[in-house]
Amino acid sequence: MIFRKKRRPGRKRKPHLVLPRAARRAIDKARAPYVRKVIIWGSDLEKPPSQIARETKRSIATVYRWLARYRELGAAGLVTPRPSFPARRVPEEKVRRVRALLQGGGRSTRRIAALVGVSQSFVARLAREPSKTQRSPRHRGRPR
């Protein structure tokens, strides 16, 4: 955590806490369900959306969106919706090519990724996982 002092001439202030961006985002994510409930409670108290947006430090569009979801789906609408797209699968042909290049040796994961047309992290993941045909000597005995 970083403490920084704001300096203004003629005015003394206490130092305030300045968090890194990633930490601020993590806090916002953790507070999100609470903020959604506050939006709903504010609407139940008949506060105008502009006031709710100011109090929760969210945009008016966000307030309207969560209110609409709550009216449509009830409490289940306050849960963060998951992405609707499926996980991308790498074609089996590319997986075989990457494994062959990894067994050949002499090339970096970055180079193999460029040759095959996949991400470097995918190549590194395949390099870390044990081959399905080779089992370690510890697992060759009878099953427990």
Image (tube, helix red, strand yellow):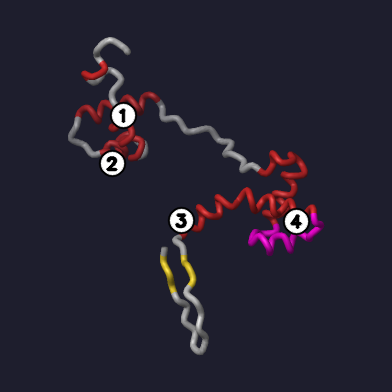
Residue under numbered circle 3: 22
Look at discs 2 and 1 and give the one toward the viewer: 1
Amino acid found under the numbered disc labelled 1: Glu
Q: Which residue is drawn at 59% across and 36% down?
A: 84
The mark nearer the N terminus, 3 or 2, is: 3
**Regarding mark 2 in the picture, which secondary structure is present there?**
helix
Mark-to-mark CA distance, 2 and 1: 17 Å
Pointer 4 local density, CA inside 10 Å: few below 14, some 14–19, many at least 20: some
Circle on res. 42: 4
The mark nearer the N terminus, 1 or 4, is: 4
- In the rendered view of the protein, which quadrant contains the N terminus? bottom left
Amino acid found under the numbered disc labelled 3: Ala
> Residue placed farthest to the right in the image?
46
Range shown magenta: 45-60
Mark-to-mark CA distance, 3 and 2: 27 Å
Q: Which residue is drawn at 50% across and 77% down?
A: 14
Amino acid found under the numbered disc labelled 2: Arg
Pointer 2 local density, CA inside 10 Å: few below 14, some 14–19, many at least 20: some
Residue 136 forms part of the magenta stretch = no
Amino acid found under the numbered disc labelled 4: Gly
